[in-house]
Image (cartoon, rainbow, N blue to C red):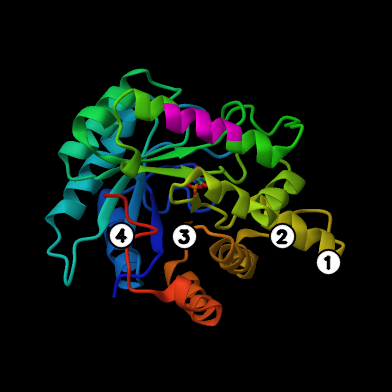
Amino acid sequence: MILPYRLMGVVNVTPDSFSDGGSFLDADAAIAHARTLVAEGADILDVGGESTRPGAEPVSTDEELRRVLPVLDGIAAVNWTPAHPQVSIDTSKAAVARAAIEAGAGIVNDVSALRADPAMVELLADSGAECCLMHMLGEPRTMQRDPRYGDVVDEVKAFLEERLSFAVHAGVREERIMLDPGIGFGKTVAHNLTLLRRLGELTALGRPLVVGTSRKSFIGRVLADAAGEAEPVELARRLPGTIATNVLALERGASVFRVHDVAPVREALAVAAATLGERWTARSAATTQTS
Ligand code: HH2
């Protein structure tokens, strides 16, 4: 059944990702993890070879390629039944994206929204790959140092509108573009919560919305505040908050959910969608699939 939303499972081939760094650095472990995510119901596999956690140091193109290519090749070689998942490459480098597309990736998830590498937009226009353009204030190394906005939703919306227009004018087909408010990327806890509360305002941009709240530290901080604890609660306790935020994002119009824990989020979204009614359960691809 084609639902009006898709689950994007995270395959981090990095030593330093904030929640699972080092777990899938070995290509075989990453490919096995990809199979598990698809068995749990992932529609898209988002493969990344560079952590974008706050404070992360950039990695070279060669190192990123060395990490992701064997995994992409391995995913391409699997005899997926009943259907091959879509493959997304989480990168801001055109050379990595180009090699990934050649290895079967159909989506480029660029957290810099085409600002990091001038060659990226041309690659997208020429290849016809789908893309996700995400908002980030600053860059990973420094983005959590006192981020400030006038109105966070208005500013994120204006940024995404400008990036969408930039991409379309450079020849990327609008129907191939998804947008993402970039939860946790240069945002305080309050900014993240406001963006999620008012996510519906971003649907006016007319493109599918991707959200990535999975296991992020704002969830740990909300829970710590509620429990009177000083430190953000640990990763293992962030699944209920991940589910809550994804369910609310579904209700507010998000249609692609980037998560580490596919099975529980998929089940939560299925029940939420059934409760919300026909618009969320219709067997149509119109609101989520790019074409
Ligand atoms: N979040 C992360 C990475 N890529 N891409 C999109 N489109 N949206 C997100 O919210 C997003 C993203 C961070 O999560 P993770 O990959 O688990 O961590 P790390 O960057 O440390 O590898």
Mark 3 CB lies closer than 8 A to ligand 1? yes
Q: Earlier in the sequence, mark 1 or mark 4?
A: 4
Indicate the quadrant where residue 15 lies: top left
Left or right: where 114 falls relative to 39: right
Above or below: residue 136 compared with residue 83: above
Viewer-nearest residue: 189 or 199: 199
Q: Position of residue 90 (x, y in %)?
A: 38, 41
Quadrant of the rendering where the N terminus is positioned: bottom left
First reached walking from the N terminus: tag 1 or tag 2: 1
The residue carrying mark 3 is 260
Secondary structure state at the residue bearing disc 3: loop
Magenta part of the protein: which range? Answer: 158-165
Residue 15 is marked as none
Q: Amino acid at mark 4?
A: Ala
* Precedes in sequence: disc 4 or disc 3: 4
Mark 3 or 2, nearer chain start: 2
Residue at x 42% of width, y 36% of height: 50
Disc 4 beta carbon < 8 A from ligand 1?
A: no
CB contact under 8 Å: marks 3 and 2: no
Looking at the image, do the residues carrying marks 1 and 2 touch, with CB atoms under 8 Å apart? yes
Say which residue label 1 marks: 227
Which residue shows up at 47% across the image and 29% down it?
Answer: 163
Q: Work out whether residue 24 or residue 241 is closer to the camera in this orientation and state it.
A: 241
Please say whether residue 59 is visible from this viewpoint: no
Q: What residue would you read off at disc 4? A: 34
Residue at 51% x, 43% y is 205
Q: CA distance from mark 1 to mark 4?
A: 35 Å
